[in-house]
Amino acid sequence: MPIEFDPEEHAYTLHGERLPSVTEVIRLLYDFNPTDSVALEQNRHFGTAVHMATSFHDQGTLEEDTVSKPVAEFLTSWRAFARDSQAEFIEIERPVYHRKLMYAGTPDRVARIEGKVWVLDLKTGATLHPASAIQLSAYLQAYNSSEEISKRDMAEGRLSVQLTRKGYKLNDWRSPVDWPTFIACLQIHNWKWK
């Protein structure tokens, strides 16, 4: 049975049981200033619009006339990344869960680039938070824990694609402490949840 995702609640369930999301688990790594709540909400909505546009584009279902000019600029940057990297998308916004640790999340993309499989996360913010590395580590491990994945499609790398109006920047996360850090966050989250 596949994982079920409710976008309204941002909730993952498996066999009727709710699983913690990667976002929930690593929330303690972020220090959001409550005075910026309006700006944070605006940025979240914009990021969602960019994610939707890139997803529709990659699936071949994008209706160009529905894309606003600001979103279109970021979409152009995404297209440049896809062209430059010659990425072959294996998965697009497909929810995954870790079969043993029982958490879930949705990597933006899993792609083959120059023969290597990467878990990709699109970012639209001006700065890239270091917790992005932890997030991608959790996605990679959950994706690789699936019984449905062939050895050929196992992910090896983690890449943030930071989109801007004028292009893109890449961050190849490689620190070996990222996965143990996520495990520590998951243990704290599960302790608090119980």
Image (cartoon, rainbow, N blue to C red):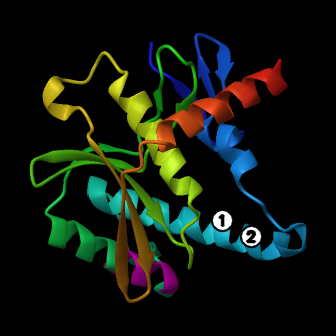
Q: Which mark is residue 40?
A: 2
Q: From which residue to which does the magenta span run?
A: 70-76
Q: Secondary structure at mark 1?
A: helix
Reply yes or no: does residue 72 show up in magenta: yes
Main SS, magenta region, reads helix
Mark 1 to mark 2 CA distance (whole Å): 6 Å
Q: Quadrant of the C terminus?
A: top right
Q: Measuring 36% from the left and 51% from the top, which residue is drawn there? A: 174
Tell me whether the residue at label 1 lies in contact with that at label 2, contact meaning CB atoms closer than 8 angstroms.
Answer: yes
Q: Quadrant of residue 139?
A: top left
Mark 1: few, some, or many residues within 10 Å (few <14, many ≥20)? some
Residue topped by disc 1: 44
Q: What percent of the width, then of the height, locates residue 52?
A: 47, 60
Q: Secondary structure at mark 2?
A: helix
Seen from the viewer's position, the closer of residues 176 and 115 is 176
Q: Quadrant of residue 26?
A: top right
On the picture, is 192 further left or further right than 165? right
Residue 127 shows in this picture? yes
Q: What percent of the width, then of the height, locates residue 163?
A: 42, 75
Amino acid at dot 1: Arg
Q: Which mark is residue 35?
A: none
